[in-house]
Amino acid sequence: MASVDIFDQKSTYYGIHLRSRRWYVKTFFHFLEIAVINTYILCVTTCEKGNKKSLNHLNFRKDVARDLREELREGLGVKSTKVRRRGSTMESPIEDTPELQPKLKVTK
């Protein structure tokens, strides 16, 4: 009974709250939630046995999502790209290449 209580507690912290009319979408995400929480509990128990420091629940979920995203990109053959956000301080690629810069004529 204690393991059910732990699962309920962990699922309320960072649960996937999804509204969908399709029952199979809800079922898929529920089983995904079960898999992530069970994996986190296994990770914590193995780290405790090995005297290693474990991640907290939120960082564990972020790592799982990042790893799944990278695996999907590798499987599809898509290169990872950096996303430019508003107000980004990244230099534009035109400024980096001198052949694309406009040539100014200096008159005396």
Image (cartoon, grey):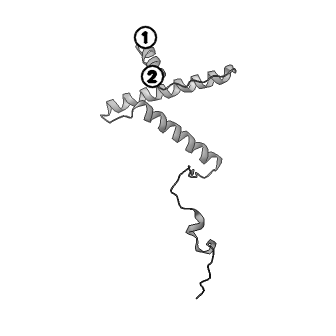
10 Å crowding of disc 1: few (<14), some (14-19), many (20+) = few
Q: Nearer the viewer, residue 108 or 71?
A: 108
**Residue type at mark 2?**
Lys
Q: CA distance from mark 2 to mark 1?
A: 15 Å
Residue 83 horizontal/vertical position (percent): 57, 50
Question: Can you say whether 2 is above or below 24 in the image?
Answer: above
| Residue at the extreme top | 1
Q: Which mark is residue 22?
A: none
The C terminus sits in image quarter: bottom right
Secondary element at image label 2: helix
What residue is shown with label 1? 1
| Residue at the extreme left | 51
Question: Can you say whether 99 is above or below 5 in the image?
Answer: below
Residue 62 horizontal/vertical position (percent): 48, 37
What residue is shown with label 2? 10
Q: Nearer the viewer, residue 26 or 38?
A: 26
Q: Is residue 34 left or right of residue 45?
A: right
Q: Is residue 77 left or right of residue 33?
A: right
The N terminus sits in image quarter: top left
| Residue at the extreme right | 22
Q: Is residue 107 left or right of residue 6?
A: right
Residue 82 horizontal/vertical position (percent): 56, 52
**Residue type at mark 1?**
Met
Total count of labels: 2
